[in-house]
Amino acid sequence: MLTLILEGVVLGLTLATFFGFGPAFFSLVQTSVHRGFWPAVLLALGIFLNDFLMVVLCLMGAVQIVTEPSNYLWFGIASGVVLIIFGLVTYTRKVVSEGVENPELPVKISGPRWFTYIAKGFFMNIINPFVWVFWIGVVVGISARLGGDEKELTYFFGGTLITVFASDILKAYAAFSIKRFLNDKVIGYFNKTAGIGLTGFGVFLIIKVIWQYLI
């Protein structure tokens, strides 16, 4: 159990570090800078609920499919290919950081109610088809590796989602101190690192499922 949780934490740290600088990140920073820390936490909670729902929905379909041993290899390879494609797209992605680079904007006291921030975080990713494809790739790949064991998958993705949520809170907390460094050049470096990391994870996943299939 502990090993699976730690593996999930490692994946969560990988996602937060290498894949955590998209639209959600900029919105999180903007909210923290212009609205305050706690509204940004509510936004992060909405993102967490969205990720949780996506994982659950993917697992509901993936567990039934990959429990057939003959499917382990092909689904593992397919998910690895998806991650490699995401890595290449992320590596070549252009940076759009409008609105974040102006730290001198005044902080607004009035604003939407608490549930608006949660809803914004929730719907930010759910309308993005690439996020769905990404989670499907990860969930199917891990499900194939763990043989569709629901208990083990719960431990693994519990560690992953909680880690990502905690990292979003830390990003919101650190927004005031790092905002002056958030220029296009720096984010571009993160994108390239993210692309390499995701591609490497995809290759590792393919090798892992092939190895498990052979033994």
Image (cartoon, grey):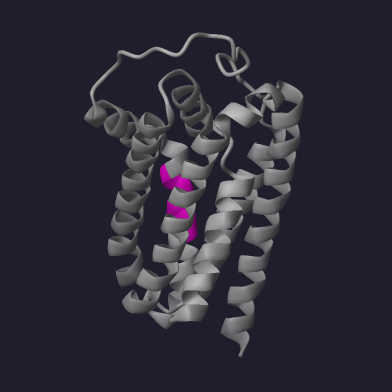
Q: Residue at x 74, y 30 (%)?
A: 186
Q: Can you say which quadrant of the picture contains the N terminus?
A: bottom left
Q: Residue at x 52, y 33 (%)?
A: 25
Quadrant of the rendered image containing residue 35? top left
Q: Position of residue 109 (x, y in %)?
A: 35, 14
- State the residue in front, 66 or 38: 38
How many discs mark residues in the rendered view? Answer: 0
Left or right: 202 in relation to 109: right
Q: Main secondary structure of the magenta part?
A: helix
- Identify whether 22 is placed above or below 98: below
- State the residue in front, 121 or 66: 121
Quadrant of the rendered image containing residue 36? top left
Q: Can you say which quadrant of the picture contains the C terminus?
A: bottom right
Q: Position of residue 203 (x, y in %)?
A: 68, 62
Q: Position of residue 83 (x, y in %)?
A: 59, 52
Q: Which residues are magenta?
A: 132-138
Q: Residue at x 67, y 45 (%)?
A: 194
Residue reaching furthest to the bottom: 215
Q: Residue at x 30, y 13 (%)?
A: 110
- State the residue in front, 213 or 105: 105
